[in-house]
Amino acid sequence: MRLIIDGDGSPVKEEVIYLGEKFQLTVLIVTSIDHYTNKEEPPFVHFVYVDKGADRADYEIIKLVEPNDIVITQDYGLASLALPKGARVFHHSGEEYKKETIDILLNKRYMSAQMRKAGKKTKGPKAFTQKDREHFFAVLDEALKKELSR
């Protein structure tokens, strides 16, 4: 089991790294070369850099993901591709994407895009708060405890 972060815009990298250390798991952060860093990370953290371009990180994650990996992303499309590969997928809000509900989320995204094309305003994501961060941490911590006790 590995923790794989869709890293371009993830606000929970530090929390995932902390949990990776706690549970002795490899953490992969897949991100655009635009976000290159030479910040020193612990040896269990690996950056995978991809070229600039829409969805490049997503495609790389799908190539890398294996059954039992945990993916952290806010991208419904990526979640819909990782779930059939046997991964568990979490949003940084703490919501776990499920095979049973991902089609509904994809449909909502499509409908919002259609409304925007038609010139209508749609709600954007709410601001990410400290409470959201703490909730994500608690949810992922509990999920890892359960997975690793099996």
Image: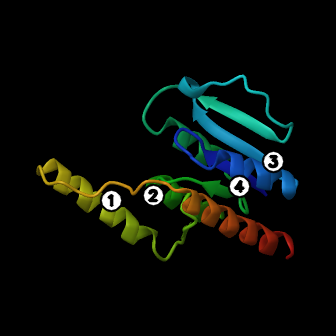
Q: Is residue 34 above or below residue 15?
A: above
Task: Work out whether mark 4 precedes mark 2 in sequence or the reverse, and give the earlier one.
Answer: 4
Q: Please report the residue visible at 25 percent of the width from the left and 53 percent of the height from the top.
A: 113
Q: Nearer the viewer, residue 132 or 79?
A: 132
Q: Amino acid at mark 2?
A: Tyr
Q: Position of residue 77 (x, y in %)?
A: 45, 54
Q: Which of the numbered marks, if any, corresponds to residue 76?
A: 2
The answer to whether residue 88 of the structure is visible from this angle is no
Q: Quadrant of residue 135?
A: bottom right
Label 3 environment density (alpha carbons within 10 Å; few <14, some 14–19, many ≥20): some
Q: Nearer the viewer, residue 5 or 21?
A: 21
Q: Nearer the viewer, mark 3 or mark 4?
A: 3
| Real-space CA distance between mark 4 and mark 1, rounded to the nearest whole angstrom | 26 Å
Task: Work out whether mark 2 precedes mark 3 in sequence or the reverse, and give the earlier one.
Answer: 3
Q: Which of the numbered marks, if any, corresponds to residue 26?
A: 3
Q: Amino acid at mark 4?
A: Glu
Residue that label 4 marks: 66
